[in-house]
Image: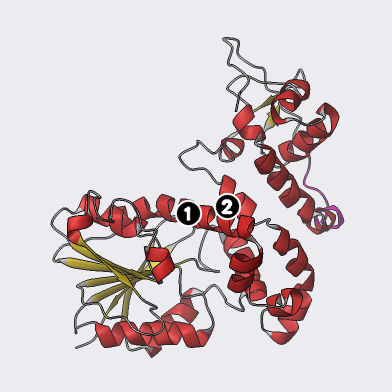
Amino acid sequence: MTTVSPTTSTPQTHTPPTAPTPPPAMRLRELAFGAACAAAVRAAARLRVADALGESPADATELAQLVNTEPVPLQRLLRALCCYGVFTETADGKFSHTDMSRLLREDDPNSLRYISLWCTEPWTWEVWPRLDDAVRSGTSVFPETFGKGFFDYLHQDAAESAHVFNRAMTTSSMQSALDVAELLDLTGVSVVADIGGGQGHVLASLLEKHPEVRGTLLDLPGVVAKADARLRDGGALAGRVHIVAGDCREDIPVEADLYIIKNILEWDDDSTRRTLRNIVAAARPGARVVIIENLVDDTPSMRFTTAMDLLLLLNVGGAKHSRDSLVGRLSDSGLLVGEVRPVNTYLHAFECVVPG
């Protein structure tokens, strides 16, 4: 996509006077209109406005030509996003990037474009209004709304949404993989197993950092078939990796010094308990187990994690954990829970050991 080319001039950003905090009635009105903000982020992501905007400010007419929209509605969209810090308006009515708007660019190394699209996919607008039904029943409203379970619907009836989901999960996993690799001490570890590890981005990052370590990736057949290229035949790490197709809720036929389970203990309680029991059954006494999850408490990203918790309730009947609830599940499975450490602003790592 063509972008507005940079210039050598320094833009004068228009900074409106600091407004007093709105009264409670207005803040509640703003919350009730929260769908407008989500829709505006989605529209900007789909139109690729951030990709079109270069390093110099551009007005709505210039940008409209690049993204094939009408200028006035685009200006209204950008004005709404500026209220939330996504883009900013200069004194002469042009628009510039902010730290947040850059994250909507697909070429940004920390891009959240696909995650923003995923959180606002068409099916979300049909299940959010039924949150009261989910709270009453404690179960997913997805089968009743769409006539089938969430993943069946995604892969059978919503190919574009499935593509967005896959891209969003890949982006998120790649970005957090480096944080996990930086956090974990692999002293004394010869073999690490990434259980339910998706395409293996965490495993690949660990093996790159620790050339003496070997690894195993276990996930469903269709998932590991698309594993990170570094792990597959011909990849730079293939000689140190064993890829296993399987379902960790049924069996974990893997021996390792360190087992990693990241962001998969958010299904129903039965699936979570079976996965943890399988880990304890597979691991030898003294093996480390590191559980990495979002928490709905004790985190600087509670607005994000509590929102994801509600979405999980709606689509699969799952839940994000609190620190206490996860420690309880881990202890009940027989694991000895040790230190809990933050990985980044939205993930925590629970260090556990299989008892002797």
Q: Earlier in the sequence, mark 2 or mark 1?
A: 2
Q: Helix, strand, or loop for circle 1?
A: helix
- Residue type at mark 2 is Ile
For label 2, count other residues whose C-alpha is less than 10 Å away and answer few (under 14), some (14-19) or many (20+).
Answer: many
Image spot of residue 252 (x, y percent): 31, 80
- Residue type at mark 1 is Ser
Which residue is rendered at x = 52% and y = 52% of the image? Answer: 167
Which residue is rendered at x = 43% and y = 86% of the image? Answer: 273
Q: CA distance from mark 2 to mark 1?
A: 8 Å
Q: Helix, strand, or loop for circle 2?
A: helix
Q: Where is mark 2, residue-wise?
A: 115
Q: Residue 24 appears in which quarter of the rendering?
A: bottom right
Verify CB contact (< 8 Å) between mark 2 and mark 1.
yes
Q: Is residue 158 magenta?
A: no
Image spot of residue 287 (x, y percent): 21, 77
Task: Report if residue 94 is visible in the image.
Answer: yes
Q: Where is mark 1, residue-wise?
A: 172
Is 157 displayed left or right of 35 in the figure? left
Question: Extreme top residue here?
Answer: 8
Q: Quadrant of the N terminus?
A: top right
Which residue is rendered at x = 71% and y = 63% of the image? Answer: 123
Q: Residue 147 appears in which quarter of the rendering?
A: bottom right
Is 115 displayed left or right of 272 in the figure? right
Q: Which residues are magenta?
A: 19-27
For label 1, count other residues whose C-alpha is less than 10 Å away and answer few (under 14), some (14-19) or many (20+).
Answer: some
Looking at the picture, tell me which residue is in the foreground, 352 or 243: 243
Looking at the picture, tell me which residue is in the foreground, 310 or 246: 246
Up the image or down, 316 lies above or below 243; here it is below
Is 317 displayed left or right of 292 in the figure? right
The scheme the figure's colours follow is secondary structure
Q: Which mark is residue 330?
A: none
